[in-house]
Amino acid sequence: MDSATAPSAKQTATTAFTFPSSRGVLAPFDRPGFQPAVAACGLFVVLNLITGTIVYLSGIFDPALSPEQWRHHFIEELGVSAILSAGFCYLLAVLIFQRRHYNQALIDLRPSVDFSDDQFKKFVFSRALPSRQFYWRAALGGAAMSALFVFIDPRIFDGFNPWDFSQQGPTAPWHRVLGALMGAAVSVFLSVSIYVSVILGILAKQLKPLNLFDLGNLKPFAEQGTASVLWITGFTAIFASFHLLSSRFFTMILIFAVMNAVICLGALLAPVLGIAQRIQTRKEIELASVQSELDRLGPARSLAQSDRLGRTAELLTYKTFIESVSNYPYDSSTLGRVSLYLLVPLWSWAASALVEKILDISIGWS
């Protein structure tokens, strides 16, 4: 077969192992041609139209509000809704991308795992893919825990009581609904991320013997970590926009910067902890073999005038190379991209602060 037309290793693996399109709670949204980002944007518009309708009708039926009060109320309530619905819709799209990315990682890892085809399929469909019940339990748990999210509201610093609906207007119950939806999405995303890291750790233990001269087959582990950092940073950038509701601008920036850095560090390391252990074990085996060979050649002082000097130099060079191999499959370019991802919230905060300034100048909203 001509090399130009021969299938690549990735194509071969994809042909040998694929996922049925009807499996899993997210399967209806994970079909060919479905665009999660477009669907998320459409849902975002619908949710905020509902908010706008509620606020508009409340203004009509509350003649005590002056036009200035009504305008301020409309912008503030729509702002809260926009942040909550943006976080929810963003994570819905991310869940689809996460599923696709993870499925592709399993396909790419197939040639490197020391399983037969039947063993690998059994492992994937019995353990590697989260069940429908897993998704629902995570979603319901997150929705229940969303009651605690209200205490992250920066307005609490200014005496705001999140449970006093009489002070919050007619949109407060709707905001709680949006908060529950976002809590469910956050819980599912974090639960699946942890689940994926555990499965990748199991697969790391089942990999064929590593070749320290070529660790390219470990790329799916690293890609899972960098993708998680990007997804988490995007959500943090959206959620950090809550600082628009508070005068404690720098306090909120500090809180979200620390939170994002800690979570992203965990997301970066979690998928590669198993493979880091495998690399370290392989390095220890190779170093022990080199040291054994050096010991057999004899003490260093007896090698200066010996024909064994060349062999010793080769072993020492190999030992230096082994020690230089990183336990974590992240190269400098990958770490550079991750650093750029972490700057996303800074741009978001700067953009939202600019929007706040424009609104203040144009319509007197402060």
Image (cartoon, rainbow, N blue to C red):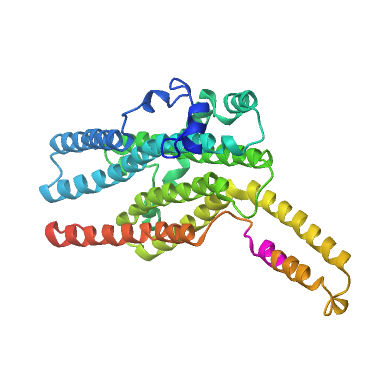
User: Mainly helix, strand or loop, the magenta region?
Assistant: helix
4 drawn magenta: no
Q: With respect to residue 316, does 230 lie above or below?
A: above
Name the residue: 57% across, 34% down: 110
Residue 347 appears left or right of 217: left
Name the residue: 88% across, 70% down. 298
Q: In front here: 46 or 347?
A: 347
Which residue occupies 35% across, 41% down? 90
Q: How many marks?
A: 0
Q: Is residue 17 visible?
A: no
Seen in the picture, residue 227 relative to 93 is either above or below; the reply is below
Q: Image point 63% across, 38% down: which residue?
A: 203
- Please state which of residues 347 and 179 is positioned toward the viewer in this rendering: 347
The foreground one among 119 and 178 is 119
Q: Position of residue 311 (x, y in %)?
A: 77, 67
Q: Quadrant of the C terminus?
A: bottom left
**Furthest residue to the top?**
22
Q: Which residues are magenta?
A: 319-326
Q: In which quadrant of the rendered view does residue 180 lie?
A: top left
Up the image or down, 271 lies above or below 43; here it is below
Direction from residue 53 to residue 8 in the image, left or right: right
Query: Residue 243, position in %: x, y?
Result: 34, 56
Front residue of this view, candidates 215 and 227:
215
Q: Is residue 323 magenta?
A: yes
Answer yes or no: is residue 129 visible: yes
Residue 68's x, y, as percent? Answer: 13, 51
320 w.r.t. 233: above or below: below
- Relative side of 243 to 194, left or right: left
List x then y, in percent, for residue 226: 48, 50
